[in-house]
Image: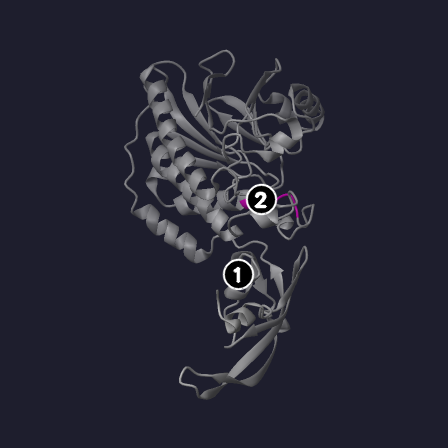
Amino acid sequence: MGSLASKLESKKPAEQIGSMELGPEGGEFRDVKSDKPITDWSEVFTRFNLDPESFEIVDDTVRVSTWQQSKGLDDGSRDVVNLFSYRAQFRRCVSKGPTEAEITAARKRVQGWKLPKRIPGSGLGPEVAAVVNLADMQAMKAESGGIDALLERMYRGLEMTQEYINRQRKSGRNINELVLVNNGDPFEGIAGNYANQLHTVQGGLRAQQNHVLDIWEAYSRELYPQFDKGQFVTVHCNHTQYGRQGGSAKSLTGDEDTGGAFLAETLQRVLRGRAEFEHVKFTIPHDEMNVYADVAGVPVGFNHGHKIPGNDAKGFETWLNGQARGDAKAHEARIWITAHRHHFAAWDLGSAMVFQCPSCEGDNSSKWLRDMTGKFSRSGILALLIGNHHPMGWSDNAFL
């Protein structure tokens, strides 16, 4: 049983800490109380359950009023304190990518890497490329353990990729080329893809992109130096469109304005200057949704797949028939590698073999896939050998 005074104290109304209005592009703080001048707004964003890395104050909208108030001290005397009330508008941060300082720091890390020795292609026969597809990582998505679980999966996947390559070389495959592919959606984004994305994402754009860059650097560092030839291929996708980060349902800039392309360009700059990576060729589209590469003499087409209607082989075939009318390379591709639909599938269309990559985001975790199809998926990395060592142009596909 507490005292009467304590009961009355517990019934006092909660202190008014201010109010906030939030819209697609940003919002406004009103009557934000503080007992000291506010110079860092991170605490204020946190107070209202907003990620400080995802928003910024519009400087010329800050308004403040101040007054003095008597305050009782522990010794029974009273003092006068200054109090403040703020009003300010804020907006979403559109593209906080890695800064020049962060890129410089990454280059310094590269200089200190202990790199594996180059291993020439073993065995006889045509040259073969190992193609490793990193699809739909969606870094900072909260599902399936969030970023910590994703990092564990991706670094475990790197070990399994090395084991796959060692196993294929031991069997006699003449593997002298590595192709790493960003098949799209490497990070989650902030808003604009589905309703609750803004409220479930674990970190801001800068944090998301730096996690992706760390993963790509690790795969590059451990794998590329082992091969005579190397390629990094990236495609445009939906989750990393910068124009959508303000909450719009559509891109507000252009198809070329994506975080995936920016990160590929950043990786290219980070690796530049080391002899161990001079053999790596980068394929980075401008605004093209279809990307093409010569892989060990086999023409291969890549895209994320978010522009392809339908969820099965028939839908892809209909799309490809239309693409071939205006894009000769679409018909020439003997192999297509796509993603977006969060589960593995493969189709033989006669003129081309199609591989749909599984997602890396987590086992059975894709709410999108469950909502669309009722299906469950297993996360993983699709790896396969491509070259003229086989009549189909490919062999030994594996789910890592």
Q: Work out whether mark 2 precedes mark 1 in sequence or the reverse, and give the earlier one.
A: 1
Which is closer to the viewer, label 2 or label 1?
A: 1
Q: Amino acid at mark 2?
A: Thr
**Relative vertical location of residue 193 with respect to residue 82 in this rendering, above or below:** above
User: Which residue is the site of mark 1?
Assistant: 46
Classify mark 1: helix, strand or loop.
helix
- Whether residue 241 appears in magenta in the rendering, the answer is no
* Quadrant hosting residue 323: top right
Residue 311 position within the rendered picture, expressed as x and y whole percent measured from the top left: 66, 25
Q: How many marks?
A: 2
Residue 320's place in the image compared with 285, above or below, is: above
Reply yes or no: does residue 258 show up in magenta.
yes
Which span of residues is magenta-colored? 254-259
> Residue 53 location, x and y as percent?
52, 57
In the displayed structure, 140 sits above or below 129; it is below
Could you tell me which secondary element the residue under label 2 belongs to? loop
Residue situated in front as seen by the camera: 354 or 393: 354
Direction top: furthest residue? 391
Horizontal and vertical percent position of residue 290: 61, 32
Residue 240 — which label?
A: 2
The rendered magenta stretch, by its main secondary structure, is classed as loop
